[in-house]
Image (tube, grey):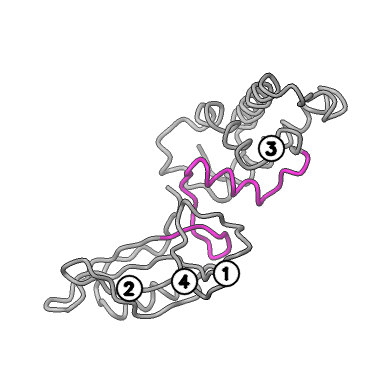
Amino acid sequence: MNAETSDQAAVFAVAVSLRAACEKREAQDSRLNLSEAYSGMDEFWRELLRVGILFEEWACRHVAFDHLWEVWPYFLERRFGEACLAVMDATELASFDADDCLRVAFRLRLPVWEDGVLPIPVDVWVGNPVEGASFKAFRIQSVREHLSDAVVIPFTETSDPFDEELGERYFGIYGVEADGTLEHIADRRSYMFARDLVMKLAPGATCEERVMGLW
């Protein structure tokens, strides 16, 4: 699909998937009444469609569709509902926003473009073409600092992008020795700055200007 154009089939697939997941949750929980939670099923459907529109518009801006090897609407119909209810309660769809789009994308492991703004994980390995160099490769990895004890930890696809106990994402640059040992070289606030340093350390190396996270 064209990543610039919303797909109405995808919007409908989100709504159908989310409805099925919510109704399944309702059948399992006697305390949950979707009609009461949304003041009627018409309003429930409006929220389903709103979520579908919002997520599809977000995906068109951020998802690397060329790297998604599934038919987008079918994928959403199969997976979206359960992924959404893993990050929010079935009664809270009215609060679904752009942050929740990213939370669901984490759950779905979608290929999301690194754009310097979204807090997504990045892990890039760059071969070193310089003959005789002590580092055989370089690694650019997103990291965050645990605020309570100042310990730096990797920011990966299993992380919570909105964990308030962690600081802002930045990028660690590591040299990789022949035996796989990593040596920390420097940190940079953006992927592009980290890439620029690696290109200086390894002239002639191939390091993508645009990379993905999550996938």
Q: Which residues are magenta?
A: 94-122
Q: Dot 1: what SS?
A: loop
Asked if residue 115 lies in the magenta stretch, the reply is yes
Query: In the picture provided, is 73 more to the left or to the right than 96?
Result: left
- State yes or no: discs 3 and 4 in contact (Cβ < 8 Å): no
Residue 76 spot, x, y in % from top left: 55, 31
In the picture of the structure, the residue carrying the numbered disc 3 is: 53
In the picture of the structure, the residue carrying the numbered disc 2 is: 174
Of the two numbered discs 1 and 2 on the same chain, state the one appearing first in sequence: 1
Q: In percent of the image, x 30 and y 63: which residue is there?
A: 125
- State yes or no: discs 2 and 3 in contact (Cβ < 8 Å): no
Q: CA distance from mark 2 to mark 4?
A: 14 Å
Q: Dot 3: what SS?
A: helix
Q: Dot 4: what SS?
A: strand
Q: CA distance from mark 1 to mark 4?
A: 11 Å
Of the two numbered discs 1 and 4 on the same chain, state the one appearing first in sequence: 4
Residue 20 spot, x, y in % from top left: 64, 22
Residue 61 spot, x, y in % from top left: 58, 50
Query: In the picture provided, is 179 more to the left or to the right than 165?
Result: left
Of the two numbered discs 2 and 4 on the same chain, state the one appearing first in sequence: 4
Q: Which mark is residue 152?
A: 4
Amino acid type of the residue tagged 1 in the rendering? Glu
In the picture of the structure, the residue carrying the numbered disc 1 is: 168
